[in-house]
Image (tube, rainbow, N blue to C red):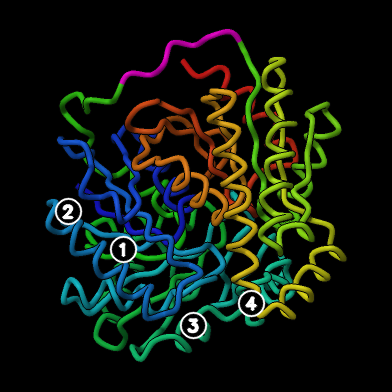
Amino acid sequence: MIGIVADDITGANDIGIMYAKAGLSTDVYPLEALDDAAPGHPQALVVDTNSRLDSPEEAYRKVRAATLALRDAGCRRFLNKSCSVFRGNVGAEFDAMLDALDASFMVIVLGFPKNGRTTLDGIHYVRGVPLEQSEFRHDPVHPMTESNLIGILQSQTKRTVDGIPIGIVEQGAEALRAEIERKRSVCQYLILDVRDQDSLRIIAEAVREEPLLGGSSALSEELALLLPKPTAESGEPGLPVPEAPEGVFCVAGSLMPQTAAQVEDAIRHGIAAFELDSFLLLEKETRERHAAEQARSVCSELAAGRSALLYASNDKEKVAETKRRASALGLSNAGVSRLVSAALSDAAAMVVDASGTRRLLVAGGETSAAVCARLGIGGLRILKEIEPGLPSCLSLGEPQIRLVLKSGSFGSERFFTKAIGHLNALP
């Protein structure tokens, strides 16, 4: 059994689909619900620590606890799934996994070519642009102002960090494996360059016996193909019988430009959209009243069989002014992010309770975690991939809910309309 620790729910699903589409049963649980996991473990068990916005100390505690729980559940191979651009507490979380397992070495691969992430000579690129010049430089909580992955990680850990350049990777799996063995004695974290999918295939072959891996989900797509396939039925829960297409409830909390473009595209294609005004969320009284009003509007659309979208304010000037007003009230950027996610999740719970909808699309890692927690979703079975790193899933428990939980920076412009069609067509 493979044990995976991810720092947010969309990342957990992102890596989970890499194993599910290779034929391995794959479940995702939040750390606090892991003890309630259904009997009969899947081949891949993913734990979401929801730790990206935590302090390094709290993130360390969560990842250490998750790793020990996975070890006690029978896992002998471990992966630490980080953000594909190293946002969050990567040093503390990698350290926690090594400490929990009394280990001293981890191979890290961050490149995800299918989603525009490549690493060359240790410099990380997003769709051909150095990380520090990409949209992630303006991330409201974790602004990425450096592109050198070795430098980013080294600033967060006392362990030694080194790398292997693309020239060695492209010599093939045998040469790469030999270089990894040589580096094992001189560093504790080893970051590998990635140019394209062929790079990942070579790396997967070279590290197929490594007990500890870290980084993005992309390597797992190739690695899963090299793993032994299950010889018995996995006991996958039954899927709901498809009904006639109906409205899908969409929630968008991410401020990434990809999600903003997806929201605009959904509106252009006739999906009714309702903005959760960030100015009205800063005071408790206006927040609750506004959320209830927008939830009622969404319910009206769903009752008529139409999809509806509830989204957080994403206009740049409005977001900047919201931060200014929040700062005057003593709220940090992370505090504002949590406030918006909580308001969206409260409104989502109102909609689900009032409308009975069982089809949800949620965009944004923090928003996805908040919505799942608010709805009491304790576990997920990964189903099918819609686009790279973006799967559908089914809640484990009753009532069963079809979900798509989307990372804010992933997906094509048409993703919302594609996901709506996918949710309605699930077998």
| Mark in front: 4 vs 1 | 4
Residue 239: in magenta span: yes
Distance from the alpha carbon under mark 3 to that under mark 2? 29 Å
Q: Position of residue 276 (x, y in %)?
A: 74, 48
Range shown magenta: 238-244
> Which residue has dot 2 on it?
75
Do callouts 4 and 1 mark residues in contact (Cβ within 8 Å)? no
- Residue denoted by label 3: 150
From the image, state whether disc 3 or disc 1 is nearer to you. 3
159 left or right of 51 in image? left
For the residues marked 3 and 1, what is the alpha-carbon distance in whole angstroms? 24 Å
Please state which amino acid type lies under the numbered disc 4: Ser
What residue is shown with label 4? Answer: 332
Q: CA distance from mark 2 to mark 4?
A: 38 Å
Alpha-carbon span between mark 4 and mark 1:
49 Å
Tell me which numbered mark, 2 or 4, is placed earlier along the sequence.
2
The CA distance from mark 1 to mark 2 is 27 Å
- 248 to the left or right of 241: right
Nearer the observer, 198 or 234: 234
The rendered magenta stretch, by its main secondary structure, is classed as loop
Q: Is residue 372 left or right of residue 140?
A: left
Residue tagged 1: 174
